[in-house]
Amino acid sequence: MKNIINLAIISVALISFSCSDDFLNEPKPTDAVTENVIFDSREGVEAHLSGIQRFYRDQFRGADGSTDTGGMYSMYFVRTVKANDIIQGVSWFLFDYDNDNREPNYRRTIFTWDYPYYMINQANSIIQGLADSNLGVNDIKQLEAQAKAHRAFFYFQLAMEFQHTYSYDPSLPAPPIYTEMATEGKPMSTLSEMYDLIIDDLTYAVANLDENRLGKSYINKQVASGILARVYLVTENWQGARDAAISAYGGNPSASLNASEYGNGFDKIENTEWIWGSPQTNDQSNYYYAAPHAFSDHFADGYYASYINEDFRALFSATDVRNLFDETYVPAVGTEYKFLTTTKFKFAFDSDLPLMRTAEMILIEAEAKHRLSDPTAHDILFSLQSNRDPNAVKSSNTGAALLEEILVERRKELYAELGVEWFDAKRLRRAIPRTGNHRLPNSDLAADDPHFFLKIPQKEIDANDNIDASVNDGKNR
């Protein structure tokens, strides 16, 4: 039996812990930490969790250490450049922008498989270690809840990246499921089985966490609820999405939004609207890897590689605080896309990276209430619109028109952060037509296009006897 590549056991002795100020009162990192030390105290397990959280923004070395295969930020940015609102120049992520980066031997495919499984493996090591520890019941439940939330988060990424969306056909094959440390490969699961595990893990996390945490990079009840709200959008559990979103941000938009912070560069985790983020310091930095900051900021050292579609800018009023667009260049003939930029993201080596914000949860609540025929959907939507634009007018839209307004607001609010345009098109089984001044104007994505997901890496097929070589064949691949 071949050994599985994706979940080769990584010794907990080699976990690297962050020294960021965000990680408070944790054990000092050492070159060798035994399993007994880690699971002998809550502080030891929290240090292990700190190591996991560092890899959300650290440069993952499992692929080849390239700039476009970093932490969670690079997965989000890939989704951003596959859509219509952002134009990627001839730089890192250009093949993703071309929607031509999904074959089984490509770096993108290998990274998008290996990185989530690495993180899942670390979460499983905590869950398994806690089962054999002598910690108190409450400590075990709270620490296990954090680990399960991490595991669910990364299985959610695998489900989104390696198959059609859930509503297309939940019986379709999905990546293998591992709930414990493993040295041998398992067969493919189904989307239904994977989402069942994701929801079970997140439900457990929400039930066993509270608002307390060591810093904003840690998962607490609000973060777990926010992840669950995203999952419920995909599975079309509208009541669940509404309740989880309200739990994540507190249910009071006026107390949760601060328009004055929107134009400050999206580089500080202390921002009151950030629910979850990845902190960096000058000595704990991924330097020029950070996306979108290093790519979209044309006024600091970086790649100067990301531009704004002129059609997207047209969606913003002049008084909208999110209208942060700059006519930076006079493009030469044949480079018309090199014109419009955004100052939304400020790049420096200590620029923090957003993972979840209050506004996203407000918009999930608005969509869920609309789906449930709740007339207060208008009120929730306007609470955000009026905060961002003092001249906003409350919508009178209903039905499909109101849904479109909410989806446009998601694009305007969250552009370049999470790949929201791609995420919504995939879950709603919609096309992404490329309009405006795109570098590749004839690179549309059709509804349910196979380019919305990746093929299974060939090295995984070669290493795992339980995955058939024909897995990448057929209409669903």
Image (cartoon, rainbow, N blue to C red):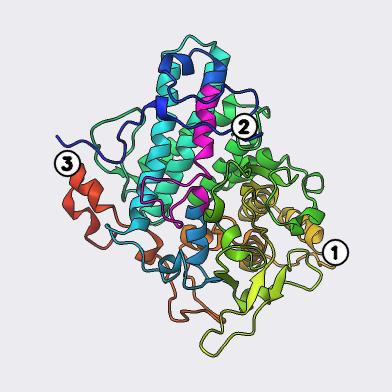
Query: Mark 1: few, some, or many residues within 10 Å (few <14, many ≥20)?
Result: few
Inspect the magenta stretch and tell me whether residue 162 lies in it: no
Can residue 237 be seen from the camera position used here? no
Counting from the top left corner in percent of width and height, residue 219 is at 59, 34
Q: CA distance from mark 3 to mark 1?
A: 60 Å
Residue found at the far left of this picture = 1
Q: Identify the residue shown where x is 38% and y is 33%.
A: 121
Local packing at callout 2 (Cα closer than 10 Å; few below 14, some 14-19, many 20+) is: many
| Residue at figure coordinates x 56%, y 17% from the top left | 42
The residue identified by callout 1 is: 390
Q: CA distance from mark 2 to mark 3?
A: 38 Å
- Marker disc for residue 465: 3
- Alpha carbons under labels 1 and 2: distance apart: 33 Å
Q: Secondary structure at mark 1?
A: loop
> Dividing the image into 4 quarters, which one contains the N terminus?
top left
The residue nearer to you, when weighing 344 against 152, is 344
The magenta-colored residue range is 45-73
**Tag shown at residue 220:** 2
Upstream in sequence: badge 1 or badge 2: 2
Question: Which residue appears farthest toward the bottom when viewing the image?
Answer: 333
Give the mark nearest the N terminus, 2 or 3.
2
- Picture coordinates of residue 111, whole percent (x, y): 37, 51
Q: Amino acid at mark 1?
A: Pro
